[in-house]
Amino acid sequence: MKPVIGISPDFHSGEQDGAIGSPSPTYYVPERYMKAVEQAGAIPLILPYAHINTLRPLFAKQLHGVMMIGSGSDLNPHCYGEPPLYSYPIMSKARSEFDIALTKAAWKANLPLLSICGGMQTVNVALGGSLIQDIATQLPRAKNHKPDGPVARTTHSIAIVPKSHLSKIVGRRRFRVNSCHHQALKTVAPQLTVSAVAPDGIIEAIEAPMCTFFVGIQWHPEHLYECSEPNQLIFSAFVRASRRHAATTH
Ligand SMILES: [Mn+2]
């Protein structure tokens, strides 16, 4: 039986940004996220930004996991009680409100959840954590976590916390990852713990130790899994947990 993974899409309002060629509001998901879930044995399903109560019936049976993906724009710092300090593009309110509500609903329903890059940052904020708004200016001694070049290029290593879920999933203490983020986690939400850090101390993965699978990663495994065993293992562990969840709800 294939589990169904709900994916929260990215969104263009159609006004300020003609980048995807549509003049009207448009949902979209980079294909790599869909393929990564599909090849691991699940069915990816794009969710609309409906009111969370409209979607809630899905949480009982039809949805077996949730994936939160990255974004080109930043979560509005107001979401974690800070004014915006810089002029980076801000994520649409439609998306940030939905992503925060979806995270809380998935948490409550104990659904397996994998969050990636900006998705991990949103999950942390949804559960009460905060963000560094710009690594380069707020932590000038940190390395450049958004270097030029292809997203699939690995640029720094991560050290994985022993005995964490992540260490059990990937079966190793460190490996090299890609890096495409100018923000990072500052305070970690109370229910979450750090499971990997970069050599400069930037948080690269989080998890909820009490959940079966609630993992956030700051790099982009969807660009690496085809040629990288640890990244492949993250998607297969996520799908395995979702399949187990499906079995318990039927
Ligand atoms: Mn990084």
Image: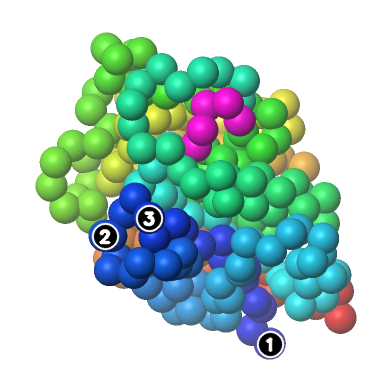
Residue 132 position in % (x across, y down):
45, 22
Residue 8 position in % (x across, y down):
56, 61
Q: Nearer the viewer, mark 3 or mark 1?
A: 3
Give SS at disc 3.
loop
Residue at (76, 58) in percent of width and height? 52
Q: Which residue is mark 3?
A: 15
Residue at (62, 61) in percent of width and height? 49
Residue interval drawn in magenta? 75-79
Residue 33 visible at all: no
Residue 221 located left or right of residue 27: left
Task: Tell me the CA gap for discs 1 and 2.
Answer: 38 Å
Q: Nearer the viewer, residue 236 or 38?
A: 38
Task: Tell me the CA gap for discs 2 and 3.
Answer: 10 Å
- Sequence-wise, which precedes: disc 1 or disc 2? 1
Q: Give yes or no for residue 35 being in the magenta stretch.
A: no
Residue at (57, 80) in percent of width and height? 43
Q: Nearer the viewer, mark 2 or mark 3?
A: 3
Query: Residue 245 appears in which quarter of the rendering?
Result: bottom right
- Sequence-wise, which precedes: disc 3 or disc 1? 1
How many neighbours does mark 1 have within 10 angstroms: few (below 14), some (14-19), or many (20 or more)? few
Q: Main secondary structure of the magenta part?
A: helix
For the C terminus, the quadrant is bottom right
Residue 12 located left or right of residue 100: left
Q: Which residue is mark 2?
A: 19
